[in-house]
């Protein structure tokens, strides 16, 4: 089911954070009175057009009163803007109510859901210049810092969907920021594994992985003064890429202006590689960073994972949470490097 349809349902109903006792993870589940099973098979084309129409109306507003953050060029035209999602997956209210039932923990899914849009209709990151990409990174940082100061927010997810099969829903390049009252299960697992590695080896696992990739070079894609990009040894998807800082930091929000430009450079390399090497596949990328809980996470590092949509998630993967990747990380890197010179 496409992202925009899920957003539509959540917008008109309420949503809950429900905890899975068996899998030790949280899910967001929508509630809507009167929804019938056959309603899930509405005409998706009409749903897509409705979503795009509503978002474009927000983009075309002459008044910026609805916007959370706006960047403008010398001609006063907007270049990047951030606004609250018209179809949020979370309810924007301060207090989350405990709605547990029996042994099952559950809470109102409260938080903030924002959209970051660049004024580049029909262009992806591969076609944007470094300053434009750095401006998007600046918007990420600005909103992250603002949202993390809310005492009800514990973690913030920044992600980007490009293309229909990746959940992209409008023609403008757009990312999303979702501020959660919990630490997501995926980040929680990474924190546990990173802390365990630090205690056992007295070093940061991100340093270990990054330094080996730079030394080994078989999976290395590109590096500059501040960042390293490689295909992870145990990639979960074909041609997936990971970007990590050379100076390990758990906190993306502490990125400097100089680092935004070098990160923009390495992101540009990644997306040009996908465009020229894989014929512009749909893709997702996300930023994982330490929770905004006030704790120190010296055993962790923020990173960016990029996943091109090159394969279908099927029954075995769903049953085992174990990916079958049809090309090795070494062969993926060897192929992609040709398009990143």
Image (cartoon, helix red, strand yellow):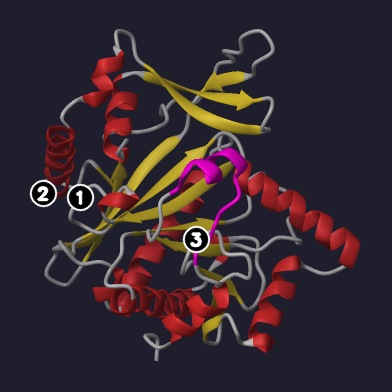
Dot in front, 1 or 2: 1
The Cα atoms of the two marked residues, 1 and 2, are separated by 13 Å
Dot in front, 2 or 3: 3
The residue to which callout 1 is attached is 170
Answer above or below: position of 39 versus 207: above
Badge 3 marks a residue whose secondary structure is loop
For the N terminus, the quadrant is: top left
Image-based side of 56 in relation to 165, left or right: left
Q: Residue at x 13, y 63 (%)?
A: 77
Answer above or below: position of 117 versus 91: below
Looking at the image, can residue 128 be seen? no
- Please state the extent of the stretch shown in magenta in the rendering: 313-326
Image coordinates of residue 75 in percent, x first then y, are 11, 70
The residue to which callout 3 is attached is 237
Which numbered tag is attached to residue 60? 2
Quarter residue 149 falls in: top right
Q: Is residue 315 magenta?
A: yes
Q: Is residue 184 magenta?
A: no
Answer above or below: position of 36 versus 198: above
For the C terminus, the quadrant is: bottom left
Q: Residues within 10 Å of mark 2 (few under 14, many from 20)?
A: few
Badge 1 marks a residue whose secondary structure is loop
The Cα atoms of the two marked residues, 2 and 3, are separated by 37 Å
Quarter residue 281 falls in: bottom left
């Amino acid at each position: 089911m496409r992202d925009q349809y899920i957003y539509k349902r959540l917008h008109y109903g309420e949503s809950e954070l429900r905890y899975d006792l068996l899998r030790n993870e949280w899910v967001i589940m929508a509630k809507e009175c009167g929804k019938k099973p056959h309603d899930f098979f509405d005409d998706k084309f009409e749903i897509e057009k409705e979503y795009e129409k509503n978002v474009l109306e927000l983009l075309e507003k002459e008044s910026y009163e609805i916007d959370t953050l706006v960047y403008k060029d010398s001609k006063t035209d907007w270049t990047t803007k951030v606004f609250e999602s018209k179809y949020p997956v979370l309810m924007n209210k301060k207090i989350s109510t405990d709605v547990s039932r029996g042994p099952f923990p559950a809470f109102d899914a409260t938080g903030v859901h924002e959209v970051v849009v660049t004024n580049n209709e029909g262009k992806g990151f591969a076609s944007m210049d470094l300053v434009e990409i750095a401006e998007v990174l600046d918007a990420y940082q600005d909103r992250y810092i603002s949202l993390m100061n809310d005492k009800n927010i514990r973690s913030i997810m920044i992600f980007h969907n490009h293309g229909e099969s990746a959940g992209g829903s409008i023609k403008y390049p757009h990312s999303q920021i979702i501020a959660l009252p919990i630490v997501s299960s995926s980040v929680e697992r990474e924190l546990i594994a990173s802390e365990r590695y630090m205690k056992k080896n007295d070093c940061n696992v991100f340093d270990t992985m990054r330094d080996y990739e730079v030394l080994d070079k078989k999976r290395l894609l590109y590096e500059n003064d501040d960042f390293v990009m490689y295909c992870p040894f145990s990639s979960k998807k074909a041609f997936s890429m990971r970007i990590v800082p050379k100076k390990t930091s758990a906190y993306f929000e502490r990125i400097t202006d100089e680092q935004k430009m070098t990160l923009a450079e390495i992101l540009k390399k990644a997306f040009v590689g996908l465009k020229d090497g894989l014929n512009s596949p749909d893709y997702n990328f996300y930023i994982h960073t330490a929770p905004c809980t006030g704790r120190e996470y010296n055993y962790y590092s923020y990173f960016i994972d990029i996943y091109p949509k090159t394969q279908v998630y099927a029954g075995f993967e769903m049953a085992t949470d174990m990916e079958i990747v049809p090309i090795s990380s070494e062969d993926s890197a060897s192929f992609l490097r040709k398009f990143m010179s």
